[in-house]
Image: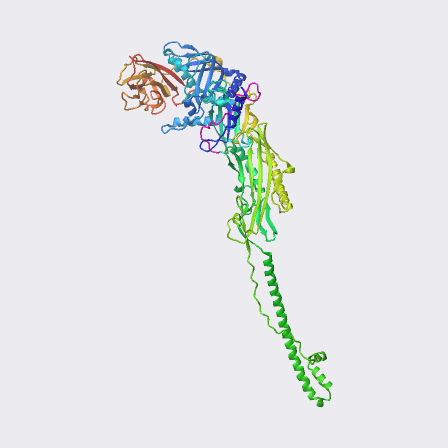
Amino acid sequence: MDAQFQNAEQASRLKTSLDLSDGDHFDQVIAISQGMINHAIKRIHEQNEDMNDFYGDSDSGSISADLAPSELVIPVGDPAAQKNNIVIWRTNIKQGTLTVNYRDVPPKDYTIDNWTIDVKVPLTWEKFEDAPDDDDAKKNRKKKQRDFIHNNFEVPGDYRPERLYAKMASGWWGEGVSFAGPSSMADKSSDEYATWKEVKENDHASSTLESIFKDISLKREEDGMTTIGTRFNLDGKIPEHDATYAPTSMIHQSFPYRIGSESGKTGWESGIRGTGDPGSRNCLLYCENVDNRPMTWRELPQTGNFTTIGNPNSPGSRVDGSFVLSHQLIFEKFLLPKLQVFVKESQIYPGPAHIDLNGDHSYGLEIGVNPSKDPYGDPNNPIYRFRAVGYGDAHYEAYVESTYDSPLFDVEDKDAIAKWQAAIQEREYAMKEAERQRKMRQQQEEEMRQAEAVRHTAEAMARAVGAIGSISNAVAGIASVGYGSSEIARHMGPGPVIIDETEWVDPGIPEEPPLNHGKYWGEDFFSLSGSPRVTVKWQKGGNRITVNGETNYNVYVTIADNANVNSSHQLENARWREIVRWKFTWELYIDVTVKDGSLNLSVTHDRNYFVRVENNTTDVPDSEHHWTQSNLAENLQRELENLERALNLGFANSSKFFYPGNGQLTFKNAMFSEKGDLIAEIEYQDTPDQGKIIIPPPKKPDDPGNGGTDKPTSRLQWTTISPVKSSASPVEIKITGKNTTNSTVYLSKIEVKYTGFKLGTDLFTSVDFVTSNGGADKVEISVQAESASTMSTPVLAPRKITSKKVECLTTYQAATSPIAIQPGGSIHLIAKGATGKVGVKKDLGIKEYWCDQAGNVPEGDGYYMAFAAVELS
């Protein structure tokens, strides 16, 4: 294939997505090409040669064959198969013989060399749900089928080819799975099975072939075998701890390989069915969810191809299968929660700004906190959550609006404030001086009062000098009442000290000067912000995740005299402006590699140049943003080391994201799709374990070593009256089983299965069976007994194959089990209805189920199929 084709294939693979049309998604999908599956099946057959030896028989006949490896075929181009989620399981017969038993003539052999038999196998098993009219026996069987499939086939995380082989070749072919064309001869002849079947002489052989396969499958299902007789000893569910996210539910669906004309190929737009390229690139999908997330069947839309044809000359260009992890799982569940802490630590939370008219200012900020939205500092806070954004450039982004919203603030006028503060100080000084003067006046008044008293005393004593004898005696007398000589001298001096007698008047508290006003404003959000934005992008077609952080710390300030402004853009008389812009950025890489069944995630970054800053402010000292840069880098570096530890220790005790299916699949070349899903190439590991498969040797009647015995005979002798009249009116057909022995015959039940067409080509022209109120448009079933147990009303289990074809199983039982038929006694099985065309012949099979008088079933098969021939005349 040329470069154009390979480029188209690669582009197609990158367009794959696990998103569903209803907005939901599958957590992971394992896409295995049809060619990869069939190659593994071939290996299984080569390593277990006994699987190629097939023998199976029933009362209708037998098949003996040498098989070639079976094949899975995705039925591209079959809308019904696609809608019903059906694939084709092809059984290839190299050499074989179909032996058909007839009632009155020897068996006839048909050569089936180089035949292939295609059987439609549903990938979902909804038909095993109970129906309202199911009886207990049918409900129990359906439950057994559901449990069998769930426990053995629908095992999430188990992708072994043996498990798939067991599912496709299982015994459930007997339940609603039809042989379907085109089922061509392996030698590529134009004859199809459907064509061969229409040939009249092959009609009985084809019915026998289908009957044998169904009978064999039902019998072998009970033994845990596939239809071809293999038993897979598969162990239980995959241990959940093996995978980082173990799948808990799984469904299968097919997925065609399609590619448009941009590849240079025409006719491949809708897909092609076949076993060679491009048909071999059609896929079987394992669609899985984890953590018990609900799972319902929905078709995965086709947006691209999970496999490629590649170029034979370019080793490694061919992709046989893919393991795809959804971006919801690998990013949203696995990685992004661990990156939220980087969003938290990238915050620069701003505080209020302090600015005056002289240009003095400061801006408060904190690193890695958000007190208003995250008071507890929890990195799991939803504000740090990543969200998917973008379309053509899809990625994840986390943004936290970290702002200080204070649109109006007061700015101090230093001149006015200085005058106001001086007036306050002057008033305070005046008040203190007035108080001092008041106290001085009070003291002077007291001293003057005391001096006056001294004078009066001195004068009085002077007048009495003559009586006392001298002035000294007068002084002594004054001293005797408490005045010292110095005080007497002072008070008797020239006169009082003169002070300011003016009364001070308090001017009151000075009025605070009016303030100018400023307005914070911003271009994007608020005026002052430190909001972080962290983006996570994947390399489309590569294996690298890039994590970018950007934190912008912006302050926009305008000072004006007008408080009622909406934006500083409107201010023409602004007195002062300032713009502060710091931009901090950081970057790290997470590389994804695949090794030993796991993803390895490793972190790389430039430790010496981790956090960078752009300073677009001219008047803010560099020391401020360097301090901020240093603290931001320190916080992020710490969390980076924590992330590395988490990747090394936090996931499944390893740096690895463990894939489910480890040990069964080989993983390589992981890369991201356009949607961010992680795609890895897968291959089956080299060789299946031969010990996992047991092939019981074919049990053939002519092989005594394998338990062959003489063919048993019936307990009753079965006869019918034939020919029977062809009539549009109801006619009775009676089958009689008579005990011709000398002992009582005990049966647990009797079954008759009738398959007929409403086309006049069968015994009856109706496909409606009833047990009463019959007529020409119905077939009425009844039973009579002679010298035998009283019989219950027959139990009918009709199954309409089409509107004109029915298969009805009638079960006869005694009112009190078991059925006892005395010597000479008879059981009459009666069917009454309008009969078909003259010449119709029919062999009716009657199955006796043996038991003893107590109802115990003997060892071995415990039943016998007899035949009664009826012909219409």
Q: Is residue 488 magenta?
A: no
Q: Examine the image and state in which quarter residue 485 appears.
A: bottom right
Residue 696 percent location from the top left of the image = 50, 18
- Residue found at the far left of this picture: 729
What secondary structure do most residues of the magenta stretch adopt? Answer: loop
Q: Is residue 625 left or right of residue 100?
A: right
Name the foreground residue: 77 vs 113: 77
Q: Is residue 740 visible?
A: no
- For the C terminus, the quadrant is top left
Q: Is residue 544 above or below residue 430?
A: above
Residue stretch in magenta: 293-319
Q: Is residue 298 magenta?
A: yes
Residue 48 percent location from the top left of the image = 53, 17
Q: Is residue 581 left or right of residue 146?
A: right
Residue depicted at 60% across the width and 50% down the height: 362
Q: Is residue 770 above or below residue 500?
A: above
Q: Examine the image and state in which quarter residue 214 appears.
A: top left
Q: Is residue 802 visible?
A: yes
- Residue found at the far bottom of this picture: 467
Residue depicted at 59% across the width and 52% down the height: 355
Residue 105 percent location from the top left of the image = 37, 9
Name the foreground residue: 196 vs 585: 585
Query: How was the colour assigned to the protein in this rendering?
Result: rainbow
The number of numbered discs placed on residues in the rendered structure image is 0
Q: Is residue 722 above or below residue 577?
A: above
Residue 226 percent location from the top left of the image = 47, 20
Name the foreground residue: 324 vs 312: 312
